């Protein structure tokens, strides 16, 4: 695939402009000079109308005469992001005043084996190398200060749209980074809840990047922590972060999954499958079985786990087989949680949190309870729980045996 470079911000032309060599810069831009002409991203030709939306917001913002933000009263902290299904170190109840939470994410385009059994693979587009991108945790009133880096080795431009943020298309308009570029975006977390973030470069590249893994979640906790409907505090012992990813992998004429040399090479084929709206895979944490076996989530009887589920593109209906959602925040943390749910709902383009305290040992399957997706497309994770069995809750009174008719 043609490498996407920023046509307006080429390093050569920028340097030349800074030196005052405007003509050389202009030549580079038009391709009439000795330097190779930067190529405009193809996406603009594919869907010109929607391709412009993210750029338009950015220009508007830059042209404004807005006052600088008052950052007095904030203290700065760094949050070290970790790979899913884990959560970064954080406080459930905020101590001290509001913070500017500094995080860094680097885009990485990498080949991922989606299903070892049949060789399905994808050149995934990722934040920090994982599908989903890392979970970010802050408190309401905090500022998120993201440094977004796109290394020179990338083929494509990337950006980020935070559903939890306000303005500039969720920051998408202010964060376009081409290979070799970085940017810093600061935004205030004003809405408590779990929210999706995702890449949205423009046009068909938006669903293309999202369905290639470029999405994740941020949890904005109330400053005084989670509460039940009566205002009593609710606390968790651990977080299990599930990113459900729908993939649309092209097949050849024999039905075998196609393989590609580099990120972006599958673009035309992928779009064709995407238009059918039926995913070939729907998986947790990037691949079939990523959270089963060795990758299963571990817990103990009596442990309270907060399950954070992100689906940036498609509706999902998670169910914990053998357990429940004791408290489920389908909308935001402003609303009282739903209680004692069997199956809950994740609207495509959102993230939800469900809290459960394990009462029995054993293997629990956390599935998309569209069971075709859960079983046949891959959306199954396991939680392996240690502890003492409670016969008062369940007992096998008679094991399976034959009987006389
Ligand atoms: Cu991207």
Image (tube, grey):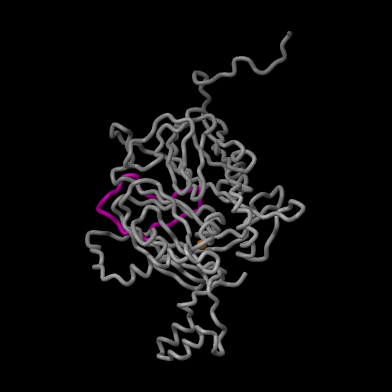
Residue under the image location 61 percent in, 43 percent down: 378
Determine the main secondary structure of the stretch shown in magenta: loop
Location of residue 157 in the rendering, given as x and y in whole percent from the top left corner? 51, 68
Q: Quick check: 211 above or below 262?
A: above
- The picture places residue 181, in percent across and down from the top left corner, at 47, 72
Residue at screen point 43% across, 89% down: 22
Q: Is residue 112 above or below residue 391?
A: below
Residue placed furthest toward the front: 49
In-front residue for pair 129/9: 9
Q: How many tags in the picture? A: 0
Instruction: Indicate whether residue 99 is drawn in magenta.
Output: yes
**Left or right relative to 403: residue 179:** left
Residue shown at the point (53%, 71%) measured from the top left = 41
Frontmost residue, 74 versus 205: 205
Residue 11 lies, in percent from the top left, at 48, 80
Magenta includes 283?
no
Q: Which residues are magenta?
A: 79-102
The residue positioned farthest toward the right in the image shown: 254
Q: Is residue 195 left or right of residue 373?
A: left
Residue 289 position within the rendered picture, expressed as x and y whole percent measured from the top left: 62, 44
- Name the image quarter holding the C terminus: top right
**Quadrant location, the N terminus:** bottom right
């Amino acid at each position: 695939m043609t490498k996407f470079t920023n046509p307006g911000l080429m390093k050569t032309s920028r340097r030349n402009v800074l030196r005052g060599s405007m003509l050389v810069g202009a030549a580079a831009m038009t391709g009439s000079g000795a330097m190779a002409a930067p190529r405009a991203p193809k996406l603009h030709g594919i869907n010109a109308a929607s391709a412009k939306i993210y750029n338009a917001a950015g220009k508007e913002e830059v042209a404004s005469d807005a006052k600088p933000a008052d950052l007095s009263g904030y203290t700065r902290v760094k949050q070290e992001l970790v790979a899913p299904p884990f959560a970064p170190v954080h406080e459930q109840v905020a101590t001290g005043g509001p913070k500017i939470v500094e995080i860094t994410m680097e885009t990485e385009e990498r080949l991922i084996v989606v299903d070892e059994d049949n060789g399905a693979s994808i050149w995934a587009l990722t934040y920090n190398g994982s599908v989903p991108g890392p979970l970010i945790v802050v408190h309401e009133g905090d500022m998120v200060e993201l440094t977004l880096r796109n290394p020179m080795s990338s083929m494509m431009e990337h950006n980020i749209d935070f559903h939890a943020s306000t303005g500039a298309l969720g920051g998408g308009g202010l964060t376009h980074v081409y290979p070799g570029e970085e940017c810093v975006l600061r935004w205030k977390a004003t809405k408590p809840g779990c929210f999706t973030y995702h890449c949205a470069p423009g046009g068909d590249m938006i669903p293309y990047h999202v369905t290639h893994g470029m999405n994740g979640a941020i949890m904005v906790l109330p400053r005084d922590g989670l509460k039940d409907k009566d205002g009593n505090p609710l606390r968790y012992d651990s977080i299990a972060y599930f990113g459900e990813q729908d993939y649309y992998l092209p097949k050849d004429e024999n039905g075998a999954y196609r393989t590609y040399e580099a990120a972006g090479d599958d673009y035309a084929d992928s779009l064709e499958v995407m238009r059918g709206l039926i995913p070939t895979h729907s998986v947790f944490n990037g691949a079939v079985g990523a959270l089963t076996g060795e990758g299963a989530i571990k817990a103990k009887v009596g442990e309270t786990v907060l399950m954070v589920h992100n689906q940036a593109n498609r509706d999902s209906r998670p169910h914990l087989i053998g357990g429940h959602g004791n408290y489920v925040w389908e909308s935001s943390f402003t609303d009282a949680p739903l209680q004692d749910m069997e199956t809950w709902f994740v609207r495509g383009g959102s993230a939800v949190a469900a809290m459960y305290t394990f009462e029995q040992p054993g293997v629990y399957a956390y599935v998309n309870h569209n069971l075709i997706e859960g079983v046949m497309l891959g959306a199954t994770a396991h939680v392996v729980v240690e502890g003492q069995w409670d016969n008062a809750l369940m007992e096998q009174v008679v094991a399976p045996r034959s009987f006389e008719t």
